[in-house]
Structures are given as C-alpha cells and as structure tokens.
Amino acid sequence: MNNWNKVCTLDAIPSLGARVIKSALGDIAVFRNGDDDVFALHDKCPHKGGPLSQGIVAGKTVTCPLHGWKIGLDSGSAEAPDEGHTPCLQVKVDEAGVVWLNLQVAKPVCAT
C-alpha cells in the first residue's frame, strides 16, 4: 500500500540542497541536485547520525557535514571505503512541479 503525501513544490527545495520533512518515520531529508533530480533519505548519516540535510550535494551524493562520509542519494549507501546505509524513501515530482513522498512504513526503499 502506498502512502503518497504532498510535501512541497520543487522550487521550495534549494538547488544542491535539502528540505527537512517531519514525519512519523522521523526526519526525512528531501534533496534536489543540480539536474533537478529529487531524492529522499532519512536525515541521519549511518556513521554517527549526522544531519545529511546540512551536507553538500554533488551529483547523486551528499557529503555528511560531520565526518565527510559520502552517501548515495539514489541508494542510501556509503561510498567505499566507508560502509553503512541510510534508509531512503520513494519520491516523485508531478508535471505541476509538486513533490510527493511515499511515507510507507514497511521497508522504505530507494526508488522513484
């Protein structure tokens, strides 16, 4: 069962940045890269729980502001040599530029 929720417009997410959405699952960081691709991850680095929403977005990665771990926006996985995973959720942008987030509780996955 899908639980799609309207969260904002694409323009409300800074380019190369993130917006934090409060949810029953905890804080979710919704990222926008330079190509206007949108991704959603739990707002905690797998290393020490740093706020990924405050990290630097480049391509399809975000760099944790605490210790420099790079996390794949499309996978939630830390780049080698680091190891770990941040849960991610489905996100989509409709033709009107509205961003929707799937807050399905069971096993959030990385996919759009």
Image (cartoon, rainbow, N blue to C red):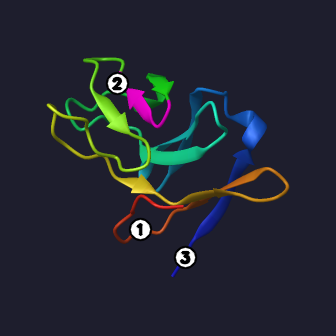
Q: Nearer the viewer, residue 6 or 56?
A: 56
Tell me the element at label 3: loop
Residue drawn at point x = 53 percent, y = 46 percent: 39
Instruction: Tell me the distance, in whole angstroms, between the alpha carbons under discs 2 and 1.
Output: 25 Å
Looking at the rendered structure, the kind of residue marked 2 is Cys
Location of residue 57 in the rendering, given as x and y in whole percent from the top left corner: 49, 26
Q: Considering the image in quadrants, where does the C terminus appear? A: bottom right
Tell me the element at label 1: loop
Which residue has dot 2 on it?
64
Looking at the rendered structure, the kind of residue marked 1 is Val
Which residue has dot 1 on it?
105
Q: Earlier in the sequence, mark 3 or mark 2?
A: 3
Which residue has dot 3 on it?
2
Magenta-drawn stretch contains 49: no
Q: Residue furthest right?
A: 96
Residue drawn at point x = 66 percent, y = 28 percent: 15
Q: In which quadrant of the rendered view does residue 69 lie? A: top left
